[in-house]
Image (cartoon, grey):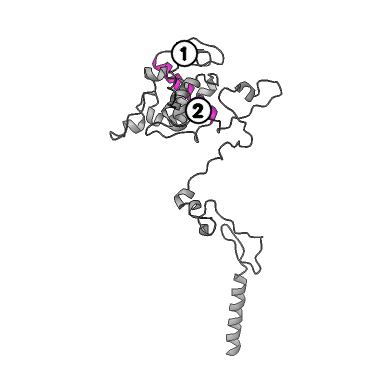
């Protein structure tokens, strides 16, 4: 009897010992008699575990909701494979059109923007950012259409008339979105649109982290094409009868001139 009990206990002990060395699989690291880095336990991104022991003071402490937010790029940094760009730069040079063996590099979204979110700087931006640095192209308008529909059309409407799905689907929308095809917005300078994309306006949030430098200007081209369509004018890579500002890639801009707003008054000394 004692032999049988000992045998049972012995089998149970060895079964328990072998279970400690169970193999790893899927999300299970398994058990090892002497664990080492052969089966490391990886940490998940944005994991809150042990966070309390990994900060300096209360100012460096973040809530779970803050840690769950997507991380943006470091301001001023340039992702690998991209190049820096700024308003007024020769974009043909950036896209490698200056030489036969030059390389076209995608433009970094972190382009400098030397305007603060104030009404004076908004007027100054509209006065100074006049020309669209990218020509009107068929490919650019096609790329801009889905971007406009996602980020702009939901409020401003597919036609740009301010009748987006969020407005027409309910009568409780807090504010009427701007009619982008109105005469005031047709006459508005490109800087006014760009400033709104960067900082937002009223209940509209900014899109500086959603649209790259080139995408902002392409979306602006698409908005101008909606304005031209509303006025039965042409806005394409072969002609621009809406204004004499935006240049078609293969044609001329023969539309009406667009007058920049007066500069803001100087700040009191």
- The x, y position of residue 175, in whole percent, is 32, 31
Q: How many marks?
A: 2
User: What is the quadrant of the N terminus in the image?
Assistant: bottom right
Observer-nearest of 236 and 268: 268
User: What is the quadrant of the C terminus in the image?
Assistant: top left
Residue visible at 63% across and 25% down?
Answer: 94
Observer-nearest of 239 and 3: 239
Give the residue number, with chain letter if any, for mark 2: 216
| Magenta stretch in the rendered image | 212-235
- The x, y position of residue 111, in whole percent, is 56, 31
Tell me if label 1 and label 2 are in contact, CB under 8 Å. Answer: no
Judged from this view, the residue extending furthest toward the right is 101
Q: Secondary structure at mark 1?
A: loop
Judged from this view, the residue extending furthest toward the front is 269
Q: Main secondary structure of the magenta part?
A: helix
Residue visible at 57% across and 55% down?
Answer: 43
Residue 82, picture quadrant: top right
Residue 243 is marked as 1
Is 73 placed above or below 8 here?
Answer: above
Is 29 placed above or below 199 here?
Answer: below
- The x, y position of residue 256, in whole percent, is 45, 10
Residue 186 is marked as none
Judged from this view, the residue extending furthest toward the bottom is 1
Mark 1 surroundings: few (<14), some (14-19) or many (≥20) residues within 10 A? many
- The x, y position of residue 143, in whole percent, is 52, 27
Q: Secondary structure at mark 2?
A: helix
Would residue 230 be counted in the magenta stretch? yes
**Spatial CA span between label 1 and label 2:** 19 Å
> Reading the chain from its start, which is encountered first: label 1 or label 2?
2
Residue visible at 67% across and 20% down?
Answer: 98
């Amino acid at each position: 009897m004692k032999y049988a009990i000992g045998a049972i206990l012995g089998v149970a002990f060895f079964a328990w010992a072998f279970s400690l060395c169970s193999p790893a699989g899927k999300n299970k690291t398994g058990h090892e008699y002497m664990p080492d880095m052969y089966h490391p336990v990886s940490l998940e991104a944005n994991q809150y575990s042990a966070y309390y022991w990994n900060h300096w003071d209360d100012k460096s402490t973040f809530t779970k909701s803050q840690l769950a937010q997507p991380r943006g790029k470091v301001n001023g940094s340039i992702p690998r494979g991209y190049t820096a760009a700024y308003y007024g730069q020769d974009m043909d040079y950036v896209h490698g059109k200056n030489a036969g063996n030059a390389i076209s590099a995608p433009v970094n979204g972190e382009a400098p923007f030397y305007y603060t979110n104030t009404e004076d700087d908004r007027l100054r931006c509209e006065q100074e950012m006049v020309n669209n640095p990218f020509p009107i192209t068929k490919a650019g308008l096609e790329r801009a259409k889905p971007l406009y529909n996602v980020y702009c059309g939901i409020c401003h409407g597919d036609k740009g008339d301010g009748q987006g799905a969020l407005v027409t689907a309910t009568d409780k929308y807090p504010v009427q979105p701007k009619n982008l095809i109105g005469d005031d917005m047709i006459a508005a300078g490109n800087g006014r649109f760009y400033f709104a994309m960067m900082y937002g306006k009223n209940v509209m949030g900014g899109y500086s982290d959603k649209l790259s430098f080139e995408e902002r200007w392409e979306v602006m081209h698409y908005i101008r094409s909606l304005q031209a369509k509303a006025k039965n004018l042409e806005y394409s890579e072969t002609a621009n009868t809406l204004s004499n500002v935006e240049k078609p890639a293969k044609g001329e801009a023969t539309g009406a001139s667009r007058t920049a707003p007066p500069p803001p008054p100087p700040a009191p000394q």
